[in-house]
Amino acid sequence: MDTAPRNNTPPRARSAPFGRDFILVVIGQIISLFGNAILRFALPLYLLRQTGSSELFGVVTACSFLPMIVLSLMGGVLADRVNKRNIMVALDFTTAALVLLFYLGLGELPTVPIMILFLMMLYGISGTYQPAVQASIPILVAGDKLMVANAIINQVSTLSGLLGPVIGGLLFGTWGITPILMVSAGCFAVSAIMEIFIHIPHQKRPRTVGVLAVVRDDLVESFRFVREKRPIFFSVVAIVAAFNLVLSAMMVVGMPILIVQVLQLSDSMLGYAQGIMALGGLAGGLLMAVVAKKLTMRTAHRLLIICALSVGVIGLALLMDLPVMATYAVITGMSFVAMAVSTLFSVQMLTVVQQQTPPALVGKIMAVMIAISMCAQPVGQAIYGVLFGAAAHSSWAVLLGAAVVSAVIALLSKNTFARLHQQMAGPTAAQPRPAGR
């Protein structure tokens, strides 16, 4: 059955693989994601320092993820219905305004409720924003450069994640939360102004019903396509969701708790550790440009196994009760490895979905898959907050348990990725996207 992209693909903006508009998207991402990164670093740390509660830290981070999951579905629909540039501009301006409102309310309102509300809005906007960026890539980039372009966007995210925690840790440790709020608000405003000058080709699709009905119908269309043409996507999403529940959630909650509470190191040391972890993502993106043609879906499970082993090594370092700085070195080193490998896996999965999906459905299907794969992570974050609180003196057990379960999930995923590899190579595989015109 022919599942090749239809001929109604919007015209591409440039014949060159990386034209002016794609470059502007990349620069806007660097600025916007840097502002986002320092906020995501500083706000949870501020809460952990103020309350000292692992349980509350886990619950708040879990709550902050919920709107991102829900609104990423809306973002996917918007990305296919609304001009993607307008989405980026509006959301960046909105985020800048929200940061200023949070600054005005901090100290005047109860810390925990206002923190939960602001983080939920911040992550919700991020969930709406990213599908627009991801859906614009196949329009702005020639088909044979799609994987490299995805790697560049991923590198931008990890570069911002590298600089954000390092600079955020220095600012927070020296001057507190205020300069971080000012810098991030400026980043969002500058990014929005720059994005005004981006041209992303857009074809209006007729809408004769209300917005909610459009969202419902578009999501139904996406599920129908996956069910009928790409049912293997459901299995892949289930694997990623399970991995997020067990391993990703542990990394989000665990690193601040391990460094700040278990090792009792400074905010700057936490910033350096998260920066090194982000550097791993950058290294993974650079490595993708080299090994892109060598990676196959048949061996994708090996990348997940490496991530699980990395967490296991951290658990062993804690069990052996190594000196504080030696344990810190193990945490940062293994986090670097895990992030590099997970970046390879993420870019590989993202490219497969883009290549195997008609252009008119890319934004929605990617948003649905991301939302479903992440739905388990908030549950995991809340659970790990409780586990780290209960196992304050034996945190190694939490990490070793997570490593074992993650390794089992990775081994069980081998057959699914092998089947996906066979489908991609089969006669029903989607044809490559045409090069830019």
Image (cartoon, helix red, strand yellow):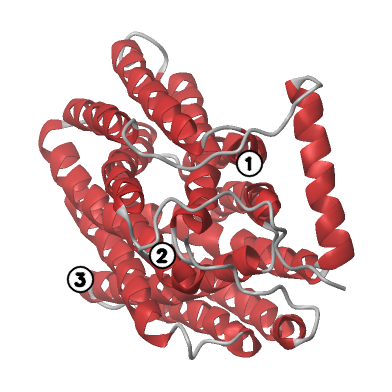
Q: Residue at x 30, y 14 (%)?
A: 107
Question: Which amino acid lies under the numbered mark 2 shown in the image of this protein?
Answer: Ala
Question: Which amino acid lies under the numbered mark 1 shown in the image of this protein?
Answer: Asp
Split into 4 quadrants, where in the image is the N terminus? bottom right
Question: Which amino acid lies under the numbered mark 3 shown in the image of this protein?
Answer: Met
Q: Which residue is mark 3?
A: 325
Contact between marks 1 and 2 (CB within 8 A): the answer is no
Q: Which residue is mark 2?
A: 149
Position of residue 21 relative to residue 334, above or below, is: above
Q: Secondary structure beneath disc 2?
A: helix
Q: Residue 80 got which mark?
A: 1
Please, which residue is most extreme toward the top here? 108
Please, which residue is most extreme toward the front here? 437
Q: Secondary structure beneath disc 1?
A: helix
Left of 123 or right of it: where is 255? left
Evaluate whether residue 396 shows in this view: no
Label 2 vs 3, first from the N-terminus: 2
Q: Secondary structure beneath disc 3?
A: helix
Q: CA distance from mark 1 to mark 2?
A: 19 Å
Q: Residue 428 got which mark?
A: none
Q: Residue at x 80, y 22 (%)?
A: 208
Q: CA distance from mark 2 to mark 3?
A: 38 Å
**Within 10 angstroms of label 1, few (less than 14), some, or many (20 or more) residues?**
many
Label 3 vs 1, first from the N-terminus: 1
Q: 140 and 220: which one is in front? A: 140
